[in-house]
Image (cartoon, grey):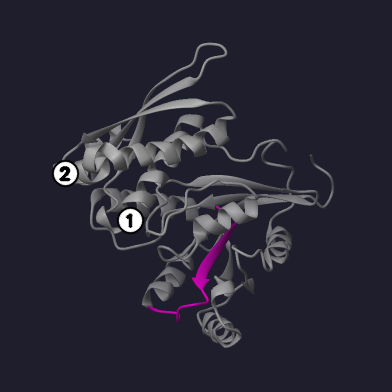
């Protein structure tokens, strides 16, 4: 598509951990692109969800939250954020309406100002959870943080102002033919999607009992014509105590994680699945370069 007036470009969402980046990505794309969790630091990869409109195309790049790294994994995630910021057309800085602007928000604003190529937009999120006075206070605080091409309050949960956000983002993107075919919803490979859905189910089930020292690898996929697809995956943790947490008493927790993940995977693939999960311990994998490489980081 290359009609006059068509716009397309890459938009990245940044913000402190747990400000709703993945939720907003999914809401804008209209389907599940990024895994979501009540835990911060859920996102570990750039995820390109694609928003298609007659007048343009927004390629959403959801990055890990900018944070002070404590491990080699954290350092690599920050490097991933920085390389993404250097390449996109527009940076959307997400700030929750429910919390006052703090040092973390100001640090991110200073960081993104070092990438002059991209236009800067402030998105005040979670307006469904905030009072009108809170939203007003946040907009004033955000305006004082620096120069913005746009400041807009939205709710990814109720959809309030999302259509306005899409329209305004498109208006800020360059004139360009479509970057992806109209049928594409995201550019992840299928194995990565499956691994992320398993990791999401595990993160939700263990709640506060397990830190984010959890990774998932797909070992094998087997499907004979007309048969249920068999998927064999490893859930990787750092310590034996974490393995016991994931498995649970009598294996009940691992069964529950597998059941939740299988439902999401079947919806994603459009056919029935047999999912086999094996929990494996890789000591201190977040700090080991070779182990990080084997796990896809």
**Dividing the image into 4 quarters, which one contains the C terminus?**
top left
Verify CB contact (< 8 Å) between mark 2 and mark 1. Answer: no
Disc 1 on helix, strand or loop?
Answer: helix
Q: Give the range drawn in magenta.
A: 88-102
Residue 171: horizontal and vertical position, in percent? 73, 61
Residue 160: horizontal and vertical position, in percent? 67, 68
Could you tell me which residue is drawn at 84 percent across and 44 percent down? 3
Instruction: Report whether 238 appears left or right of 125.
Output: left
Residue 90: horizontal and vertical position, in percent? 59, 59
Residue, disc 2:
239
Q: Residue furthest right?
A: 4
> Nearest the camera: 77 or 253?
253
Could you tell me which residue is drawn at 45 percent across and 78 percent down? 99
Disc 2 on helix, strand or loop?
Answer: loop
Report crowding for label 1: few under 14, some 14 to 19, many 20 or more residues within 10 A (C-alpha): few
Report crowding for label 2: few under 14, some 14 to 19, many 20 or more residues within 10 A (C-alpha): some
Rendering quarter of residue 111: bottom left
Residue, disc 1:
207
Residue 32: horizontal and vertical position, in percent? 57, 46
Rendering quarter of residue 186: top right
The tag earlier along the polypeptide, 2 or 1, is: 1
Examine the rendered structure and indicate whether residue 43 appears above or below residue 15.
above
> Nearest the camera: 291 or 175?
291
């Amino acid at each position: 598509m290359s009609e006059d007036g068509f716009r397309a470009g890459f938009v990245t969402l940044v913000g402190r951990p747990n400000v709703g980046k993945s939720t907003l990505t999914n809401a804008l794309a209209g389907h599940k692109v990024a895994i979501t969790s009540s835990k911060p630091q859920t996102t570990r990869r750039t995820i390109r969800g694609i928003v298609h409109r007659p007048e343009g195309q927004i390629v959403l790049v959801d990055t890990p939250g900018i944070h002070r790294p404590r491990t080699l994994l954290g350092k690599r995630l920050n490097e991933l954020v920085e390389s993404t910021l250097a390449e996109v057309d527009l940076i959307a800085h997400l700030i929750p309406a429910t919390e006052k602007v703090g040092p973390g928000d100001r640090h991110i604003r200073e960081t993104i100002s070092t990438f002059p190529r991209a236009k800067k937009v402030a998105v005040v999120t979670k307006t469904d959870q905030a009072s009108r006075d809170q939203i007003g206070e946040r907009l004033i605080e955000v305006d004082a943080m620096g120069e913005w091409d746009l400041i807009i309050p939205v709710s990814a949960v109720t959809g309030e102002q999302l259509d306005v956000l899409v329209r305004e983002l498109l208006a800020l993107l360059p004139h360009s033919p479509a970057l992806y075919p109209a049928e594409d919803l995201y550019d992840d490979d299928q194995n990565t999607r499956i691994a992320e859905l398993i990791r999401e189910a595990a993160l939700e089930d263990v709640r506060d009992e397990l830190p984010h020292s959890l990774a998932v690898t797909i070992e094998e996929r087997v499907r004979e014509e007309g048969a249920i697809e068999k998927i064999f995956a490893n859930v990787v943790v750092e310590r034996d105590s974490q393995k016991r947490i994931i498995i649970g008493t009598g294996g009940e927790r691992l069964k529950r994680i597998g059941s939740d993940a299988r439902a999401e995977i079947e919806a994603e693939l459009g056919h029935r699945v047999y999912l086999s999960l094996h929990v494996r311990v890789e000591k201190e994998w977040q700090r080991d370069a070779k182990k990080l490489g084997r796990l896809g980081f």
